[in-house]
Image (cartoon, grey):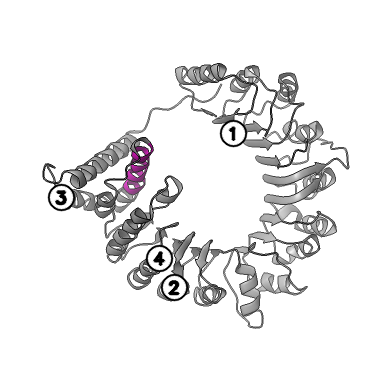
Amino acid sequence: MPPRKQVDSLQHTCFMVMAGTIHQLAVELEESPETCTVSAKEVSAVVASLPSVINENMITKVIETIYQTMSRTRRSIGMRTCLEVLLQPHIQRLNLSGLFFHMRLSGEINKTIRNVVQDTVVNMKNLMVLNMVSKCSDEILFIVSEKCPNVVEVNMSISDLVTDKGLKALALGCPKLEKLGISKCWEITTEGIAYALQYGKNLQKMQCDQLGAVMISAFKKSDATFKLTHFEQTHTIFEPQDDDIAWVGCACPCLESASLFMDDESLALVPQLGDIRILEIETSSVLGIGFVKAITNLGESLRTLQLNCDEVSQEKITLVGKCCPLLSTLHITTATVEDNQLLCNPGHLFSHLTTLYLQVWEEAVVSNECVEFFLMWCKKLESVVVKAEVEFLTDQYLERILLANPLTQAKRIILSSDKHVPLTVESVYRLLALCPSLEHLGISTWDVTEEEFFKICDDVKKNNYNILVS
């Protein structure tokens, strides 16, 4: 059976109570300041007395509380005061990403958030990590570059208020910078990216979909070297010259991962990057000899492979299993899986696989051999996501698979289709009984009635199982 929910730790309970109290006081201070028993200055003084790590956790917990309130009431009142009292000078990690990922805020509220950060970050001389996804601006970066020299990580992705000026200031003012996120910063040009590469001497990871093209055009003729561990070019199709990839491999000797949009012919050059452990490939061409050469040469170094393409043949799946025995994560998104070769797993292919994601996004049926190839023989699977037409996947069929491989380590199982998955409530309870580690079971397109779904949820609640059924 799934694991039972554990009693919340005293630490977590205290954090949530404090977060709720701070948020409630902030609401009162903004709605009825004349009747509130404490002032914002007094609340700020209490927060300032907390150790920085507790203060940083409080920011995250208060954002959770604000999100819960907004989900219920659609009101963001109290947010400004919360930020003003929580953003203290001694914090080292400022993570406001929850204000983007958890909720949709108006332009006026986002402006308020930026103003509060501008007013407070000027005193954060110990700041090391800044996560301002969708909330960053040049003005904030100017202050960080001048007042926060110890910053090692900045994520300012998804912004039209960050330009080359802000990026250049950050690169010059924060010499310890190791991780930089600038994805979807629409006002940053190739000039700004090149500048950050030139002056960010300690950069190890830059999330930038034009990184490859900028690096080659700006630095190939120089003797520059970089500490980068990640290489990326997905903005447009990457069509490198024969010696471009070899140069990147020499200039970036520490590369461990790559994310590339390439045609099949260019894929043959990828091994020249070095011993890549994580490879993400997007291609509009059919996987052919270039892919074969890449997988054959990367071999045992690969731990994660993500493929996004129009077609994957069963022959190529078998090839990956044979050439990459230590692969732990396989992520395939494709229009169709071609049945050009009978899939047969002798038992050792993908033996280290812990994460399987298989999505066939057109009205193409994934074969039962393809499902069996993984589910019957991959004994270490912790996450299984299959999104495709699987009309063959009945209760009896799943039972046969589970007899061979009961998926005892699985924490997440999602089997879905745009149309219908013929699994019933019988399979739900079978999986609950056989998978002691299960934390998430996706049954949204199964043959389960609304009444049966609510009964399942009720049983989960009554038995205190720590599992999400969706």
Position in image of residue 56 (x %, y %): 33, 51
**Relative to 78, residue 94 above or below:** below
Q: Earlier in the sequence, mark 4 or mark 1?
A: 4
Q: Earlier in the sequence, mark 3 or mark 4?
A: 3
Q: Secondary structure at mark 4?
A: loop
Please give the range of residues in magenta: 57-71
For the N terminus, give its image quadrant. top right
Tell whether 289 sits left or right of 357: right
Q: Identify the mark at residue 175; answer none if there is no mark.
A: 2
Q: Earlier in the sequence, mark 1 or mark 2?
A: 2
Position in image of residue 115 (x %, y %): 30, 61
Q: Identify the mark at residue 137; answer none if there is no mark.
A: 4
Binning the other alpha carbons within 10 Å of mark 4 as few (below 14), some (14 to 19) or many (20 upward) gives: many
Residue at point 33%, 63% (across, down): 126
Residue 400 falls inside the magenta stretch: no
Tell whether 439 sits left or right of 378: left
Q: Which residue is mark 3?
A: 42
Position in image of residue 44 (x %, y %): 20, 52
